[in-house]
Amino acid sequence: MMTDYPVTLGIKPEVKAFFDEATNTISYVVKDPASRACAVIDSVMDIDMAAGRITYDHADAMIAYIEQNGLRLEWIIETHVHADHLSAAPYIQDKLGGKIGIGDKILVVQDTFGKIFNEGTEFQRDGSQFDALFKDGDTYQIGSMPCFAMYTPGHTPACMVHVIGDAAFVGDTLFMPDGGSARADFPGGDAGALYDSIQKVLSLPDEMRLFMCHDYGPNGRDIQWETTVAEEKAHNIHVGGGKTREDFIKFRTERDATLAVPRLIIPSLQVNMRAGDLPKDRDGNLAIRVPINKL
Ligand SMILES: [Fe+2]
């Protein structure tokens, strides 16, 4: 059953994109045109995994942009627990404030990966690391802009698309039309659920702007991150042109079987399921654990 989502196409947020070359992630600052209020969506913390070194160049660029424009950060949103990059949410919150929010199905993700990473009882599986847990259709505001979150499971169980005025931040539900869709083979992923979630996104108004979390510049084209519902419906190579649910599940499952594990999955999951905080070893030092043959 489709929830009746409160779409407000008349409100057009200002969207500033920050592309991270190391992980092909696009982070956003979304600003209310009627006030100084803004939100950050899907920030990135830099990691040199070989050296075990964390830096913040990408997040610092976003922070500088927010400060230089005199903006007030109200929300730091994660569309999902990313497996390919680390969130900088706590770092940004520390500098600028704002509430860190994610979908309430994070509890499922924390349970799954709490087991895989053999987390102790000090790792809470109740989402309490986050300031806000969104349910399907939950509304919130950035300044005076009305926003809502909608469940879009499939890539992961906790994926949500955030719709802010006429702009939807689709996370890894969709890629640009020539990029198709994200994989659905991580623990808790489901190709059929992903197809249904994509249909939900495509049922938004045709003129809705869609902002991607990733782009890999297929076939040598330049990196892009913005499209529309109409463009995706007409041209998406995985779901456009009336492809059936059955076709999609078969294609997605076969394709996913050929894909390598994301380079940063081990640190990403441990950090992102903690809302961007690094885990600690038993002496309290920041440390990432590498479970063997578990993923
Ligand atoms: Fe993802």
Image: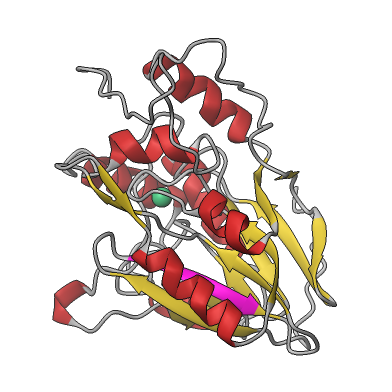
Q: How many marks?
A: 0
On screen, residue 17 above or below 82: below
On screen, residue 170 above or below 7: above
Q: Quadrant of residue 49?
A: top left
Residue 240 in sight: no
Residue 19: where, in percent of width, then height? Answer: 36, 73
Residue 242: where, in percent of width, then height? Answer: 45, 67
Residue 39: where, in percent of width, then height? Answer: 65, 69
Q: Would you say the magenta stretch is mainly helix, strand or loop?
A: strand
Magenta residue check for 245: no
Q: Residue at x 58, y 50 (%)?
A: 152
On screen, residue 41 above or below 134: below
Residue 185: where, in percent of width, then height? Answer: 34, 37
Query: Which is nearer the eye, 62 or 170?
Result: 62
Query: Which is nearer the eye, 110 or 199?
Result: 110
Q: Residue at x 73, y 78 (%)?
A: 165
Q: Which residues are magenta?
A: 25-30
Snapshot colouring? secondary structure
Left or right of residue 48: residue 153 = right
Q: Quadrant of residue 77?
A: bottom right
Left or right of residue 84: residue 173 = right
Q: Residue at x 36, y 43 (%)?
A: 83
Q: Quadrant of the C terminus?
A: top left
Q: Quadrant of residue 38?
A: bottom right
Q: Residue at x 61, y 22 (%)?
A: 125
Residue 49 in sight: yes
